[in-house]
Image (cartoon, grey):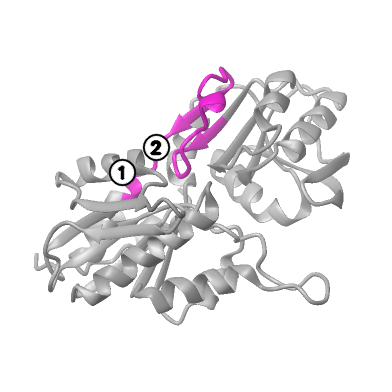
Amino acid sequence: MNSFGNLKLITGTANPQLAKAIARNLDCELTPAIAQPFSDGEIRVEIGANVRGDDVFVIQSTCRPVNNSLMEICLMLDALKRASARRITAVVPYYGYARQDRKVVPRVPISAKMVADFLSVAGADRLLTIDLHAGQIQGFFDKPVDNLFASKVLLDYLRKMKNDLVLVSPDAGGTERARAFAKLLNAGLAIVDKRRDKPNQATAMHIIGQVEGKTAVIVDDMIDTAGTLVAAANALFEKGVQSVYGCATHPVLSGPAIERINNSKLNKVLVTDTIPLTPEAELCPKVEVISVAELFAEAIRNINQETSISGLFSKI
């Protein structure tokens, strides 16, 4: 099968562990690259091998430190463009600023669109990501965007749970995601009526759906400060569930997240490795990580070989 060009993988400093795992799944080595700060905080980037005419994939989540990670990938894309790479794909497992995808009050930016512009202008010919916070962000690009679903790996774990499951959306906006999980697991569905008073603060009001006596799995695309997750768990226990699990793709886990999870009644929180865990999160016995490296490796292989990756968009 013919490939688009010589496959090259390059990683930034945001999530090298995931990049190494993807490379292992592809049975290839990471192309050497330098990304380090100067004493004044500017970032130095240098690609350590010839990439002329190659099909290059730059793996970099725009996670903490968000602005450094974003600037780093943009500099790498520009370096590759100027080095005459044949095609450059930005592999961004976690797309930062995705929650700022529209104007909700006057005189604010649409930051998710700005990130798309940065990546495009810097040199990305396409974007490969997973579980965008808002699917319409794909429309911010005038280039191909492949948005994978982590449900392919998360569902394998959930299917091992033998208890009577009910999938729970922590808010109305996540109902479609929870419904898809519930359908594939042949489980019940419930929704938490949530009222957000301030950014990063949420209050769960009441539960829509039958949850008493069941094992609840709260499904979301990310866990940031864990306020929504813990509030939803408390509301579910008040309605008589036996146990509560959290399930999300992106473990942002900022601020008081780990403290809240440790002090909560949550049995376990299942996440993927799109974002590396903080040292505090690594020590949390309730947090379990499932890798999406194999999923990304398969997508990269198919893109390079110019074959379909539509099967990877399936939620089963």
In front: 233, or 37?
Answer: 37
- As for residue 290 lying within the magenta part, the answer is yes
- Tell me, yes or no, whether the two marked residues, 1 and 2, touch with CB atoms within 8 Å: yes
Q: Residue at x 77, y 53 (%)?
A: 172
User: Looking at the rendered structure, which numbered label has been put on residue 150?
Assistant: none
Label 1 to label 2, Cα distance in Å? 7 Å
Asked whether, in this view, residue 24 is left or right of residue 97, the answer is: left
Q: Position of residue 261 (x, y in %)?
A: 68, 26
Q: Position of residue 178 (x, y in %)?
A: 65, 47
Asked whether, in this view, residue 182 is left or right of residue 77, the answer is: right
Q: Position of residue 278 (x, y in %)?
A: 52, 32
The region drawn magenta spans 270-296
Q: Residue at x 43, y 71 (%)?
A: 119
Asked whether, in this view, residue 180 is left or right of residue 173, the answer is: left
Q: Amino acid at mark 2?
A: Ser
Asked whether, in this view, residue 97 is left or right of residue 279, the answer is: right
- The answer to whether any part of residue 130 appears in the image is no
Residue denoted by label 2: 291
Vertically, is 198 above or below 7? above
In front: 262, or 244?
Answer: 262
- As for residue 27 lying within the magenta part, the answer is no
Secondary structure beneath dot 2 equals: loop
Vertically, is 13 above or below 213? below
Label 2 crowd bin: few (<14), some (14–19), many (20+), radius 10 Å: some
Q: Residue at x 54, y 59 (%)?
A: 132
Label 1 crowd bin: few (<14), some (14–19), many (20+), radius 10 Å: some
Vertically, is 154 above or below 142? above
Q: Residue at x 77, y 23 (%)?
A: 241
User: Looking at the rendered structure, which numbered label has been put on residue 294?
Assistant: 1
- The answer to whether any part of residue 254 appears in the image is yes
